[in-house]
Image: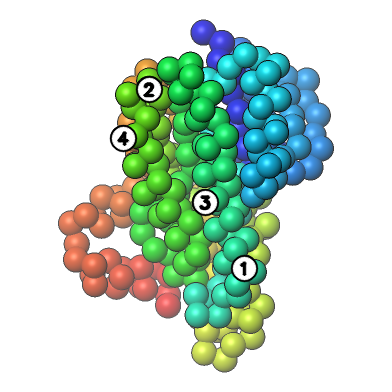
């Protein structure tokens, strides 16, 4: 059955691949992004997910046009690299505002319509970094940990309205995310953090550039769109990263920190 789908961050990477795949499957896809975009099968709308009024206006216009919204995919996100100690208030606000509050804003705009319909599905993009704290990506991890807790609580609250909530937790993927990451110049210039940050950042970028293709994640999300009862959590990663999410629940916290320090050479 054709579904009305809204997906944020649809201009590139996961969002673009997912929007295109869902459109080819016959769904009516509304892609939200900050810059103007055109596509013969995707209905693009300009929207900044950090702006609550903008979000509410765009969602309302889609509902007025279509009469309903069946699926929301919260994909918009960005990354800031650097030491937690040296992060500025502006960097923290940008990271949390985009990744977490952007998700919250979209959910709060869509939920009244789904509740009225007594049906709907929300798919929130988390990360393997939302299951373990990644060094020098601490506020990115914090934003994804926040999505994990928010989504779990939301799933419990709205199930009785016929609304399903689930998460997708990608590992390393070869997308534009790597090139668009904002790295803290203060951290790079710091005599204590700088050398280690450069080494760790090199490892991170190597793993990302050699990661899975975004179409792999798009196919998983498309399956979740079609599923009546999707699993709450869906890790999509290579074997090594998938295993790391499993052993975290077996090892002690100190052991896991030790593994992360060894892996990221910090």
SS at mark 3 in the image: helix
Task: Say which residue appears at 47% left-offset and 39% top-offset.
Answer: 124
Horizontal side of 190 relative to 265 (left or right) equals right
- Quadrant of the rendered image containing residue 213: top right
The span from disc 3 to disc 1 (Cα, nearest Å) is: 14 Å
Q: Residues within 10 Å of mark 3 (few under 14, many from 20)?
A: many
Q: Residue 91 or 247: which is nearer the viewer?
A: 91
Coordinates of residue 86 in the picture (x, y in percent): 55, 80
Task: Say which residue appears at 57% left-offset and 66% top-offset.
Answer: 92
Residue found at the very far bottom of the displayed protein: 191
Q: Are marks 3 and 1 in contact (CB under 8 Å)?
A: no
The span from disc 1 to disc 2 (Cα, nearest Å) is: 37 Å
Q: Residues within 10 Å of mark 1 (few under 14, many from 20)?
A: some
Q: Nearer the viewer, mark 2 or mark 3?
A: 2
The span from disc 4 to disc 3 (Cα, nearest Å) is: 19 Å
When the figure is inspected, residue 113 is found, relative to residue 45, above or below; the finding is above
The span from disc 1 to disc 4 (Cα, nearest Å) is: 32 Å
Q: Mark 3 or 1 closer to N-term?
A: 1
Q: Mark 1 or 4 closer to N-term?
A: 1
| Residue holding disc 2 | 161
Q: Residue 9 or 206: which is nearer the viewer?
A: 9
Question: Is residue 210 among the parts visible in the rendering?
Answer: no
| Residue holding disc 4 | 156
SS at mark 4 in the image: helix
The span from disc 2 to disc 3 (Cα, nearest Å) is: 24 Å
Coordinates of residue 31 in the picture (x, y in percent): 68, 31
Q: Nearer the viewer, mark 1 or mark 4?
A: 4
| Residue holding disc 3 | 100
Q: Are marks 1 and 2 in contact (CB under 8 Å)?
A: no
SS at mark 1 in the image: helix
């Amino acid at each position: 059955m054709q579904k009305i789908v809204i997906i944020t961050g649809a201009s590139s990477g996961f969002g673009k691949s997912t929007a295109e795949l869902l459109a080819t499957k016959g769904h009516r896809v509304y892609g939200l992004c900050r810059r103007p975009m055109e596509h013969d099968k995707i209905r693009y709308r300009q929207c900044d997910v950090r702006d609550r009024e903008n979000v509410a206006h765009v969602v309302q216009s889609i509902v007025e046009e279509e009469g309903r919204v069946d699926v929301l995919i919260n994909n918009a996100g960005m990354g800031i690299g650097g030491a937690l100690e040296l992060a500025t208030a502006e960097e923290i606000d940008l990271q949390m505002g985009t990744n977490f509050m952007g998700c919250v804003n979209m959910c709060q705009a869509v939920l009244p319509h789904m509740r009225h319909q007594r049906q709907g599905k929300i798919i929130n993009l988390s990360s393997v970094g939302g299951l373990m704290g990644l060094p020098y990506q601490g506020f990115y991890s914090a934003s994804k940990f926040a999505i994990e807790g928010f989504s779990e609580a939301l799933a419990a609250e709205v199930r009785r309205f016929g609304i399903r909530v689930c998460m997708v937790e990608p590992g390393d993927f070869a997308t534009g995310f790597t090139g668009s990451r904002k790295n803290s110049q203060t951290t790079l210039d710091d005599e204590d953090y700088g050398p280690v940050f450069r080494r760790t950042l090199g490892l991170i970028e190597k793993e990302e550039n050699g990661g899975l293709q975004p179409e792999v994640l798009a196919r998983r999300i498309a399956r979740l769109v079609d599923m009546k009862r999707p699993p709450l959590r869906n890790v999509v990663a290579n074997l090594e990263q998938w295993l790391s999410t499993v052993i975290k629940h077996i090892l002690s916290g100190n052991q896991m920190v030790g593994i992360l320090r060894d892996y990221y050479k910090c």
